[in-house]
Image: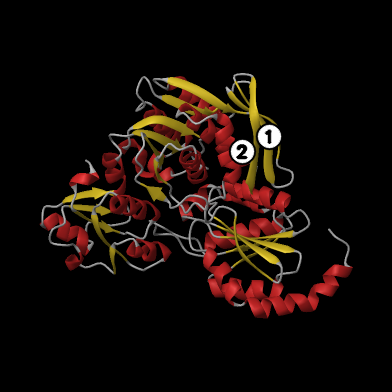
Amino acid sequence: MKLSSIRAAHFIGIGGAGVSGLARIALQSGVRVSGSDLAGNETTTELMKAGACVNIGHHRDHIPQDCSLVIASAAIKPDNPEHREATRRGLKLLKYSEALGEITRHTTNLCVAGTHGKTSTTAMLAQILHEGGKQPGWLVGGEPASLPAASAAGSGLNFVIESCEYDRSFMRLSPGVIVLNNIELDHMDVYGDLDGVTQGFIEFARKLPERGVLFYNADDERCREVARRAPCQAIGFGQGPGAVWRLHNLDASSGFARAEVTCRGMRVGNLILEVPGEVNAYNALGALAAANWAGVPVTRGLAALRNYGGVKRRFEIVGSVGGVPLVDDYAHHPTAVKQLVETARNTFAQRRVVAIFQAHQYQRLLTFMPDFTDCLSKADRVLIARTYAARESGVQPGEPEERLARSLRQLGVEAMAYGDFSSIVADLSMKLAPRDVALFIGAGDINQVAFELLARKEFISARLRAIQPMFSAAPAA
């Protein structure tokens, strides 16, 4: 399906990261775009400025009479009034993942996959190709700081796609290259166990053509298993001897990764990142390798990576109150939470780490309870919000959260579980200290607490100024 053949398209759930990206690409391709969502946000505002007609709320009359294509978010159910209307009228109706697969079927797709780091790596790869003059298309499931937008139609040969494994969505794509970051247990409702997750990635890799390439994390055992089963060339990246693209002398002690890079034993340059976290060095190396395959010289790729400014909700400092940084991060898997806390320790070495954690789905919280206990125990203080229970029912809210808090207290960590955001705001307003850093952790709406603290900035800042002499006189921890 070519967008140039579509006159008008309607997007149900147009405010979401993926669907809004497709809507933006459709606008750039000359399609008349309409859409709807339950609430407006910055994304819907930007789409309206670009020419889309966006309605708040769902109603059958929102679909234009001359519309020939309807694209629906994965969250949209068949009883949605616009979904029913599209069905009644016999319009072409596609899920987001189906539409993405059809729209990119005739391009050379560079697909970024893995349990962690997909959004950052996709943004890095798109930026390298963009700055390298390749005019790529791309679709990032977040808001990159140093790209013109989260998605672009592109006019070049390559299209960079964040390829999600949930609901086996990536199986609808046609990859020419895959960058595989890592494989861990997640999405148990889809894959069951770690072997099932690994098999899912094996099946995705098997979609590569014989002339395709799998760039894989050679330091990850499960990625190596996928590489052994790939139908095409597999090229490893990482720190170990099995990697073709290697990081040497990796140092993230300052919070920001620095490393020497070699390819096939030859030194090709220095990786210098201005975004925090050792894990971003791996993300960058995979992106660099794939971009080099696409024709961008390594030196130019390394320069583009130094310009990389991160992605919204990935260690994003949204502001500060009284000198206390407020960091918003999308981490919702124990490994990502562990990496986040470690990054905060390195980046804010003299500060006390206060973690405000919101689990994303009860199934994930219950499955990984010991792991979440372990990674959150590395913080100095933990506040646990009510779980963001997307796609779930049948769990007693509050009980798993209190269990997590109790487990942390048994390890000597000051921890509390709260039933609403207002209680967390009240706690932080009165208990934040001048040497703190506050981490807002989760893929749900926990960042709303940070924004509420910013709204109370004058009050909190005045309180922190009043107690600052007490902390200035105390010896540093």
Crowding near the residue tagged with mark 1, few <14, some 14–19, many ≥20 C-alpha atoms within 10 Å = some
Crowding near the residue tagged with mark 2, few <14, some 14–19, many ≥20 C-alpha atoms within 10 Å = many
* Quadrant placement of the C terminus: bottom right
Can residue 182 be seen? no
Q: Residue at x 34, y 40 (%)?
A: 155
Q: Are marks 1 and 2 in contact (CB under 8 Å)?
A: yes
What label sits on residue 173 in the rendered view? none
Q: In this rendering, is residue 250 above or below 386?
A: above
Q: In this rendering, is residue 455 above or below 74?
A: below
Q: Residue at x 43, y 31 (%)?
A: 178
Looking at the image, residue 296 sits to the left or right of residue 56; the answer is right
The amino acid type found where label 2 is placed reads: Ala
Disc 1 element: strand
Looking at the image, residue 14 sits to the left or right of residue 469; the answer is left
Can residue 225 be seen? yes
What label sits on residue 259 in the rendered view? 1
* Residue 390 percent across, percent down from the top left: 41, 58
Residue indicated by mark 2: 281
Q: Residue at x 63, y 19 (%)?
A: 265
* Residue 33 percent across, percent down from the top left: 25, 58
Disc 1 to disc 2, C-alpha distance: 8 Å
Q: Residue at x 68, y 48 (%)?
A: 342
Q: Earlier in the sequence, mark 1 or mark 2?
A: 1
Disc 2 element: helix
Q: Nearer the viewer, residue 19 or 396?
A: 19
